[in-house]
Image: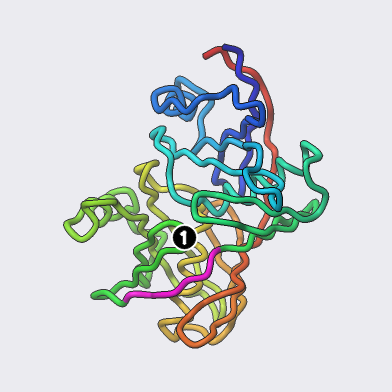
Amino acid sequence: MQLHFYKYQGTGNDFILIDNRKDFFKNDTKLISHLCDRKFGIGADGLILLQKPENNSDDFKMLYFNADGNQSSMCGNGGRCIVHFAKFLSIIEEEATFTAIDGKHKATVTPETVKLQMQNIEEVSTLENAYFLDSGSPHHIIFTENVREIDVKSSGSEIRYSNLYKKNGVNVNFVEQTGANSFYVRTYERGVENETLSCGTGVTAVAIAAFEAGLTSKSTINIDTLGGNLQVSFEKQDKQYKNIWLSGPAEQVFKGEITC
């Protein structure tokens, strides 16, 4: 099969995008893992299928697979990239509504920025020296110092495979505060099983956890990652966080064909 694909990145979080509205690409764990392999395939943190919408109110449907080939929970940067892709395909103009594994999302796109509305967050759990919350994907968050010196792969893997998360795994975020409403984050992602240059749901989780921890009183927070800067804004009503928006750049890097 000759597979036509597009390569995207959002603050260094990179993905293979496929226009699958004709449903020709069938979910194949080994094939997806091979395509995401950086030495023998195209190379990516994950693969995303743009599907025909199942609801009349949607512009498209998003299916996301981790680099290990397994379908996964929501990917924030991937969600921003697929919105950019939908605009490239002339499916949308400046606004989008689509459904992913965690439900419906809205988004806006300009040449510089893609803004993605995330799901409401009902609960933030306080752990020993850490926080846990689900921002579309599960995240363990540690506020610490000297984050640039941490061995993220080793330390993140230890937590990801710990007894606390042995059933479903978790993404692990190491966070350093750099200003009144700014933080630096490095993330270990399950499914990739390594550090990624950026993680959209992780950045979202960090912003909410920082506000919950009283580290900031701002409802718009700047997050620096290895791959660039993202911004998270939100509202808090009682214990619920809502109207959460993840904003940042997304870019089509190249397109091509591969025999598979």
Query: Would residue 120 be counted in the magenta stretch?
Result: yes
The residue shown at (35%, 58%) is 172
- Total marks shown come to 1
The residue shown at (65%, 62%) is 247
Q: Position of residue 183 (x, y in %)?
A: 51, 71
Q: Position of residue 133 (x, y in %)?
A: 39, 68
Q: Position of residue 4 (x, y in %)?
A: 65, 21
Residue nearest the observer in this picture, 204 or 29: 29
The span shown in magenta is 119-125
User: Residue 25 falls in which quadrant of the image?
Assistant: top right
The residue shown at (69%, 58%) is 107
The residue shown at (61%, 48%) is 10
- Quadrant (top left, top right, bottom left, bottom right) of the N terminus: top right
Residue nearest the observer in this picture, 3 or 194: 3
User: Residue 149 falls in which quadrant of the image?
Assistant: bottom left
The residue that label 1 is drawn on is 202
Position of 90 relative to 133 (above/below):
above
Q: Is residue 115 left or right of residue 156?
A: right
Q: Position of residue 104 (x, y in %)?
A: 59, 57
